Image (cartoon, rainbow, N blue to C red):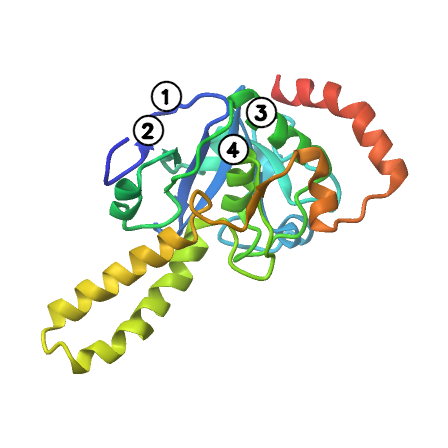
Amino acid sequence: MGLLTNRVERSEIKPGDHIYTYRAIFAYSHHGIFVGGSKVVHFRPERNLNSGEASTDSYDSMSCPTFPDCGFRQPNSGVVLSCLDCFLRNGSVYCFEYGVTPSVFLAKVRGGTCTTAASDPSETVIHRAMYLLQNGFGNYDVFQNNCEDFALYCKTGLLILDRLGVGRSGQASSVIGAPLAAILSSPLKLLMPSPVGVATVTAGMYCMSRYATDIGVRTDVMKVAVEDLAVNLGWTVDDNEEVVAEDSEASSNTQLIR
């Protein structure tokens, strides 16, 4: 991985890695956790999975010729187990970076590629991903609870206390930060006759807005065990379903990864 790209070869990724691939000609990226055995656990809008409506991130899991369990998910859940081929959909694989320095973070012009936060051990990451595959990750929200938020939580266990603000996603921060930087820098056009000067200031504001929302520097985050995630997010879980999920989770996870 380098400063300009996080692209890696398939042979380089390891279980517990946070990987992503670009969709719609690099318009956005889709994120997931590689759990080994050529399988990826990722989070998608539940409405696309239930309705079968066409979307830019949809695929027919029943057409996978290699893995019969490709596309496995629990009812009413957007967390999906896919094979690596179906996840990438002929795209390249990129590896999300953790524990980067502030200078490297700011040098990455595009959001959703790295964080200053440190990653937990791979065993813990895989446990979180497989637990959420069985129990869900709440409702999908493009700004507050998307596929990148899912992968970031699996890697760090960090949860944002203020659910009204922007989520952990670097992509969401970029989408919000770019227009905000342009608005804030617009009065400077009266003081700076040079377009280059205005562009430089706007770029600086954009980078700083991304950095301020990174989970590695935010103060409104806390470490939450995956077993306590439903309570902290206010999800309602039926008692009988919770008992069944706990009894079958260990055996199901082993079979799915295998």
Q: Are marks 1 and 3 in contact (CB under 8 Å)?
A: no
Residue that sits furthest to the front in the current view: 219
Question: Does 120 sit above or below residue 87?
Answer: above
Element marked by disc 2? strand
Q: Are marks 1 and 2 in contact (CB under 8 Å)?
A: yes
Element marked by disc 4? helix
The quadrant where residue 104 appears: top left
Of callouts 1 and 4, which one flags the residue occurring earlier in the amino acid sequence? 1
Q: CA distance from mark 1 to mark 4?
A: 18 Å
Q: Looking at the rendered structure, which numbered label has been put on residue 12?
A: 1
Element marked by disc 3? helix
Question: Is residue 182 shown left or right of residue 29?
Answer: left
The image shows residue 30 at horizontal and vertical percentages of 46, 44
The C terminus appears in which quarter of the rendering?
top right
Q: CA distance from mark 1 to mark 2?
A: 6 Å
The image shows residue 245 at horizontal and vertical percentages of 80, 31
Of callouts 4 and 2, which one flags the residue occurring earlier in the amino acid sequence? 2
Q: Is residue 236 visible?
A: yes
The image shows residue 23 at horizontal and vertical percentages of 41, 48
Would you name the residue on which mark 3 appears? 124
Which amino acid does the dot numbered 3 rest on?
Thr
The image shows residue 178 at horizontal and vertical percentages of 34, 64
Which amino acid does the dot numbered 1 rest on?
Glu
Q: Are marks 4 and 2 in contact (CB under 8 Å)?
A: no
